[in-house]
Amino acid sequence: MEKKKIIIIGAAGRDFHNFNTYYRNKKEFEVVAFTAAQIPDIDGRKYPNELAGELYPEGIPIYAQEQLPALIKKLDVDECVFAYSDVHYEEVMSVSAIVNAAGADFTLLGPKNTMLKSNKPVISVCAVRTGTGKSQTSRKIIETLLEKGLKVVAIRHPMPYGDLVAQRVQRFATVDDLKKHKCTIEEMEEYEPHVERGNIVYAGVDYEDILKEAENDPDGCDVILWDGGNNDFSFYEPDLAITVLDPHRPGHELKYYPGEVSLRTTDVSIINKIDSADKESIQIVENNIKQANPESTIIKAESKITVDNPEIVKNKRVLVVEDGPTLTHGEMKLGAGTVAAERLGAKELVDPRPFTVGTLTDTFKKYTHIENVLPAMGYGEQQLKDLEETINKIDCDAVIIGTPIDLSRVININKPCTRVHYDLEEVGSPDLKGILNDFMVEHKLGK
């Protein structure tokens, strides 16, 4: 039988998972390539034989996505599988047109073929866009269940930007583990807030192996929590699905793939950041939830902000550094650091653009909507150096760090700086405590 030739289009996350769960051991398919964008330095490498399996003794090459039309023709490709997340529908169909024009079919794999089943109860936390507040929601859920005496293991959406074989299964229990696994800033932003609180986090490349390790974690495991990335849907079949929405981007919940999938399949919809959004935008989001998923329970929440050293902000010229992905492909113009600066009476938000160097200059050219804030880009060593040099060149009185990690721990900042923390706080009823109590009863968890 002639094999169907496949290219998987992605960004070192869902693409690898789709291959592992659906294509890896099927002789009727031949995955001839991955293509990648968004992630620096991922193209030109290989998905290694150790992960690809016995059908791929040479591994699978990874190319830049710009080569996609030529690759389809050169490799006589039959089908291209789209495996990005947090993508506007216009962009999804633009890629589809490129694929079809080159002669191949265009495919989106769904939950049935890609979700794995755990032998533990699973809670999934997903979102309709990057930067809605998934991580703070995950932390709130974990802390609530820990108070009930349950052992919760978080599994984070993949961000494997280094040695893929070494990153097959990663376990993070301490901040030192972040160094051991040579984490980028983006990875630290997701893992550090968990491990600082004593939570166990798994991540990596092969999510079937990761699940087995997590279920049998040496510290015990009663519940698996899927801490989703971008707006992807869960890699694991959830027993309780929670999706977070952002009223700062009203309407996006019905315009981005696969965020709308997460919304339409969720049990609980959390409208976050209602303390910093206007009433009209909040209502638009609520109406769209009711339209897309009328059975979903709606929770409203505030993203409570605290600042370590508020005295260095008032009446000062400040540089605000925000979470990189939230600003870039999340398309936000501001984050928690900006909100903190405004509330604490900063005199001015200093424009970083005249001072940027290297990769950060490129970032502002690509993402032209970003203005008086600096995205914390740190996928690799060079980006970290560029971030440090840019911050230290900027003429300002203080730096507000609005990222989930303490940047001053990983780069040297030559001026006063303060961290912003943000936590989920539900407003009124229903709330997560009640939802989780019902979950525990249903699954006979706790005392």
Image (cartoon, rainbow, N blue to C red):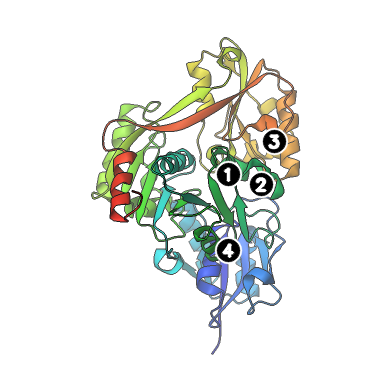
Please say if the residues under marks 1 and 2 sit with CB atoms less than 8 Å apart. yes
List x then y, in percent, for residue 437: 30, 45
* The one of 267 and 339 positioned closer to us in this rendering: 267
Q: Amino acid at mark 3?
A: Thr
Q: Earlier in the sequence, mark 3 or mark 4?
A: 4
* The one of 15 and 266 positioned closer to us in this rendering: 266
On the image, numbered disc 1 is attached to which residue? 191
On the image, numbered disc 2 is attached to which residue? 177
Q: Earlier in the sequence, mark 1 or mark 2?
A: 2
The numbered disc on residue 361 is 3
Q: Earlier in the sequence, mark 3 or mark 2?
A: 2
Q: Amino acid at mark 1?
A: Tyr
Instruction: Using the rendered image of the protein, determine whether residue 6 is visible from the camera's viewpoint.
Output: yes
Mark 2 element type: helix
Residue drawn at x 47%, y 56% is: 92
Count residues near mark 3 (Cα–Cα under 10 Å), then give few for <14, some for 14-19, many for 20+.
some
The numbered disc on residue 369 is none
Mark 1 element type: helix
Q: Amino acid at mark 2?
A: Asp
